[in-house]
Amino acid sequence: MRDCRRPVRLVDPERMSACDTCIVRNRAICAGLDHPEIAALSVMGRRRTVSAGEPLIWEDDDSLLVANVIEGVLKLTTSTADGREQIVGVAYPSDFIGRPFGQTSAASVVALTDARVCVFARGDFDRFAREHPELEHKLLERTLAELDRTRGWMMLLGRKSAPEKIATFLLDMSERLADNGCTHQSGADTGPARQFTLPFSRQQVADLLGLTIETVSRQFTKLKSDGVVALPGRRDVEILDRGALEMLAG
Amino acid sequence: MRDCRRPVRLVDPERMSACDTCIVRNRAICAGLDHPEIAALSVMGRRRTVSAGEPLIWEDDDSLLVANVIEGVLKLTTSTADGREQIVGVAYPSDFIGRPFGQTSAASVVALTDARVCVFARGDFDRFAREHPELEHKLLERTLAELDRTRGWMMLLGRKSAPEKIATFLLDMSERLADNGCTHQSGADTGPARQFTLPFSRQQVADLLGLTIETVSRQFTKLKSDGVVALPGRRDVEILDRGALEMLAG
DNA sequence: GGCAATCCTTGACCGAAATCAAACCAGACC
DNA sequence: GGTCTGGTTTGATTTCGGTCAAGGATTGCC
């Protein structure tokens, strides 16, 4: 999912005067809009950077903004009054975040890595979307896919054991962090990544899987000593035995 | 959420020649469509009854049909190869079920009570929806709301204890099964139900909350002996101390 | 380099919920 | 009435993962 790191030069990086140079332009919901529409969107939107750890949207706040992720990874979380946290979604480049057509957002959005997003005032976006069925359709397709993915994760949270959770997680990461052909000559899909760098700390993996940090750590150690994965760095994973992982994932 | 039980007479109950008498007409996604549109939908759709326990859609099957729920309650489930089950959604009257714009359905749909639905071939529905932005917009709003609800449930599955799960579940049921003013003289919202009949067996409650049937049973017994609820029948619940439930729900 | 802060790992122990097993109950049917 | 059946409750026991606590490893900073 990572985008190519080729620098993008913008005449005016604040105003989105340069949707045409946007690296997620073909994959985000704005794909397929024609020139006048893109121009209208450009007027409404602004580029923003969000540093790792910085929040973009607060849970239960008025839903004031929506955004497209250009670069980086962000987490969507819900929390209980006593501070327990559950990650309920992860947004990658080209993903849409925020809650259009609703008063409040059900989840907080916080950057996991330094990120760039292009944000819109929710009201502006809502109005624009209602006038552009093609955009709404893209948003609908995306939302339906996200709902499917979320429902799959419910099975993991409700019914899987810790080893199954970790194995499923690693396989999922391996797919979502797969190289999209940017750093390779061929444009072909290179398939799931054999090695990758997690955008999560151990605590965040725990918050994603409904486990504690200690259990996550122990399971990683177990996989390492069983020769299923190598862990060259804190957040680096190399899959040595994908078959074993798939067995474990259940 | 229950609809009034006043019988609906149909000239031809098989063909949906009588959308105009449909009891969920004002709340389902077809609300707001004009006469010619409704007529076109009528031609595409068929009414169907589904008996309690009977499946309507199979997980991983080709997504062949979508539907509106007219009456009854259905569960959406995902299962593992070894037979563990997780309920990932519950559909009530006026809810939309199925996976438009996608090749396969991520969840099975099975009736919990005898139910009536109006079904459409997915292809037909997709085509119709793309030509009717207002319908797609309604579907989008619904899908966004369902995603919010699903994410809330992830917090429950990943981070809540058994007592918290049960309390949250009962409060949720109390709201969703609330009388919608049908059986009362006033049309006013009567608020959350104080007593209601669950559409779930104990096992199904377990599948919804990510627990075992024994744990569910024990928690119900505990709530009863603590005087928080009364359980006049297998599936009947009467909330005696809502405040206590809210405390327990965390 | 030394030091602090943060993150991660490891160990000992505990407890909540699962598992295993046995009653119990409520309808349905004869 | 009796019996059968499927769902439910209850009890005894186990286990998985959480909690508590300590120790390492990395990173950043002076």
Image (cartoon, coloured by chain):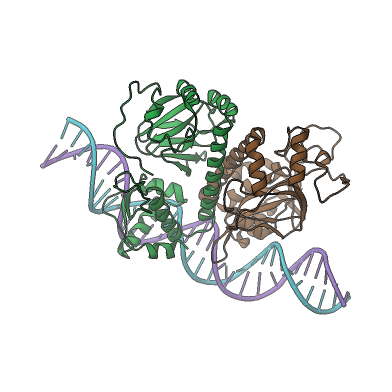
Chain colours: A green, B brown, C purple, D cyan
Against B52, residue A21 (above or below) is above
**Count of marks, rendered view:** 0
Against D26, residue B57 (above or below) is below
Against A192, residue A11 (above or below) is above
- Residue B96: x, y in percent? 68, 44
Residue at x-position 69% and y-position 54%: B225
Does residue A95 appear to the left or right of A217 in the view shown?
A: right
Q: Quadrant of residue B129?
A: top right
**Considering the image in quadrants, where does the C terminus of chain B appear?**
top right
- Residue B116: x, y in percent? 77, 51
Residue at x-position 38% and y-position 50%: A189
Does residue C6 appear to the left or right of B165 in the view shown?
A: left
**Considering the image in quadrants, where does the N terminus of chain B appear?**
top right
- A76 vs C11, nearest the viewer: A76
Q: Quadrant of residue A165?
A: bottom left
- Residue B239: x, y in percent? 72, 46
Residue at x-position 42% and y-position 49%: A206
- B214 vs A162, nearest the viewer: A162
- Residue D23: x, y in percent? 25, 53
Does residue B195 appear to the left or right of A196 in the view shown?
A: right
State whether residue A101 appears in this view.
Answer: yes
State whether residue B97 appears in this view.
Answer: no
